Amino acid sequence: MSEIVLVERFPDVDDYLRVRAAAGMHAKSREAAERALPNTLYGVRLERDGAVVGMGRVIGDNGCFFTVVDIAIVPELQGQGLGKRIMAALDAWLLRNVPPSAYVTLVADGDAKYLYSKFGFVESAPVAVNMEYVMEVGGVKSHRHLEA
């Protein structure tokens, strides 16, 4: 197997959309990705033979709120500790850059919460819960992404 290299730069729009889809994450429109990615505070990608095979990034206002998002690994490389490698890079950046009193958050899907707990994240319920909707065409607020 070729070496997998961590690069401190987030993927471009095409790789971002491809890796999200490959990892089974909810689809994002090209327009949304084009608007979002330049606002990344810090991001990393994993490359194998020059191809992006994993990613993760931090977004937020760079003062009070930081959110870890888009942790994704292509299916054929999942379960090999690459998510932990991405989280270690993001965690190191957060430790260097987040000021006292700032919130650092993420939404953990399924068993990913066990990985994130290794980096100090804890479930906040019942004190706080994640609430969300996905904006659809025409301003429709959708919850279909939460259906089993």
Image (tube, rainbow, N blue to C red):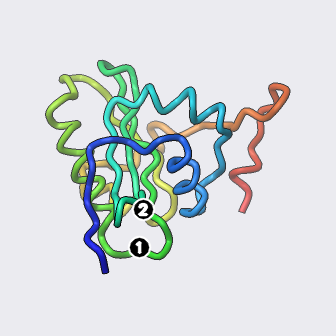
Q: Amino acid at mark 1?
A: Leu
Q: Earlier in the sequence, mark 2 or mark 1?
A: 2
Q: Residue at x 29, y 75 (%)?
A: 2
Residue 53's disc is 2
What amino acid type is highlighted by mark number 2? Answer: Val
Q: Does residue 51 lie above or below 9 as drawn?
A: below
Residue 114: x %, y % from top left: 35, 63
Up the image or down, 138 lies above or below 13; here it is above
Cα separation, mark 2 vs mark 1, equals 8 Å
Describe residue 46's horizontal placement relative to residue 111 as left or right: left
Label 2: how many Cα within 10 Å (few below 14, some 14–19, many 20+):
many
On residue 77, which mark appears?
1
Relative depth, front residue between 23 and 60: 23
Q: Nearer the viewer, residue 18 or 118?
A: 18
Residue at left offset 29%, top offset 53%: 87
Q: Position of residue 81 (x, y in %)?
A: 30, 70
Q: Does residue 52 lie above or below 97 as drawn?
A: below
Secondary element at image label 2: strand
Question: Where does the N terminus fall, quadrant-wise?
Answer: bottom left
**Quarter-of-image position of residue 141:** top right
Quadrant where the image shows the C terminus: bottom right
